[in-house]
Amino acid sequence: MASGADAAAREPAAALDDAALAALAARIRAWGRELGFGAIGISDTDLSHAEAGLAEWLEAGCHGEMDYMAKHGMKRARPAELVAGTRRVITARMAYLPASTLDGTAAANAAGKLPEMSESPSQDWRRGEHARLADPHAAVVSIYARGRDYHKVMRARLQQLSERIEAEIGAFGFRVFTDSAPVLEVELAQKAGIGWRGKHTLLLQSDAGSLFFLGEIYVDIPLPTDADDPASAAPETPGAHCGSCTRCIDACPTGAITGPYRVDARRCISYLTIELKGSIPLDMREQIGNRVYGCDDCQLVCPWNKFAQAAPVADFDVRHGLDRASLVELFGWSAAQFDERMQGSAIRRIGYESWSRNIAVAMGNALRNAAANVAPEKREAIVAALRERAHDESAIVREHVAWALEAA
């Protein structure tokens, strides 16, 4: 465990009695709110109920090329094996929906696509996102990736929370995680009572929808868990409050949600545009549409996301116009421009080649989209941009450009 002191220095934390531990847990939640977290939950480390499902999912190959999903075996479901000495997991949740998006309309109004509405702003933002998806010239980037890299933001604030605890009780053992290690984040969050797993496999909460990041602190302190605290919300169960709704399953463009609570990553647009290296399978390209990084479709149709909350920090504000950029504009970036503009963004890790590959596929789909009534001048601009990179130094980019130009 990460701590600035040896085992002997951790005696103050180990000596806390039940009353002191309960008071500390309450302060941790209060400090979490001060740091911008929408909810903090505390759970034990027993995830044995999830092991069979994880093993079966991996055995079926649903993780695709994400070898790291299988690399650590069952450590993903065994926190105390991943980090020796772990006794509790503090799970934090932070909303990421940019305020400009929640306000209603920046992207759709800029494109002249959003009609007059009598609905609330929380419904407007979803209408605006659907309008972008319907515009074949628009480059659609998943909402979570339009601002600063969440790994850095969440990790820094979880570290601050850990330091607040240390200042209160003295040195203790801890490690901070944010989508950066073999951790079953949704299972831990659900066990901690800060949401339930929806049928799309994401965490849902009735007052916040699903547009939030999760992060964890593995600690060696025997804090009271939310399951033990009658004053805390009871831990949720899978599917709680989803009822018979299947909107997320029905909306998936590629059928990646193969059933309630199960996603085959090999068919998921987020996997295809982010995790997959090399060529995107031919039979999947048209289904990607104009999504160039990730996919939000299952979240856009979820009724609970009418309660989605604005990000509490400016880090997740939209950068470089990624909520209104065109395919031609982004495809025109050089490698140097990509590196400069995506500095500090989660997008940067896929690299310029995959970024260009994704946009080439979306441009090919725009040319194939006869129903969209593509304006001749915009069609010509797409074709010209593709031809400009027909001899790109990357074989992967050349292949996808050639596929796109087949529809020219």
Image (tube, rainbow, N blue to C red):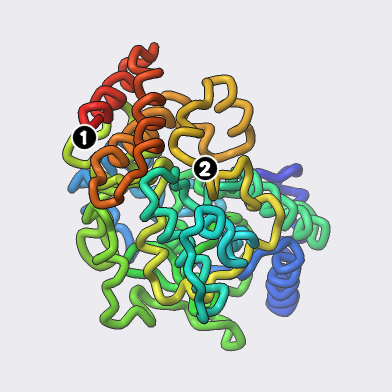
Query: Which residue lies at the image location 62% right of the left edge and 57% below the top edge?
Result: 220
- Point out the image quarter for the C terminus: top left
State left or right for residue 2 relative to residue 138.
right
Q: Position of residue 302 (x, y in %)?
A: 39, 71
Residue type at mark 2?
Ala
Most foreground residue, 128 or 233: 128
Q: Residue 243 is drawn in which quadrant?
A: bottom left
The image shows residue 265, relative to residue 51, as above or below, that is above
Residue type at mark 1?
Pro
**Element class at badge 2:** loop
Q: Position of residue 21 (x, y in %)?
A: 70, 72
Q: Between tags 2 and 1, which lies in front?
A: 2
Most foreground residue, 259 or 371: 371
The image shows residue 109, relative to residue 33, as above or below, that is above
Mark-to-mark CA distance, 2 and 1: 25 Å
Task: Sort mark 1 into few (<14), some (14-19) or many (20+) by Cα contacts within 10 Å.
Answer: few
- Point out the image quarter for the N terminus: top right
Q: Looking at the image, which residue sits at the far right?
A: 167
Q: Looking at the image, which residue sits at the far bottom?
A: 230
Q: Position of residue 401 (x, y in %)?
A: 31, 25
Task: Sort mark 2 into few (<14), some (14-19) or many (20+) by Cα contacts within 10 Å.
Answer: some
How many discs appear? 2
Q: Position of residue 280 (x, y in %)?
A: 26, 33
Residue 34 in view: yes
Q: Any mark on residue 325, and which? A: 2
Q: Which residue is mark 1?
A: 281
Considering only order in the chain, which callout, 1 or 2, is on the residue closer to the N terminus?
1
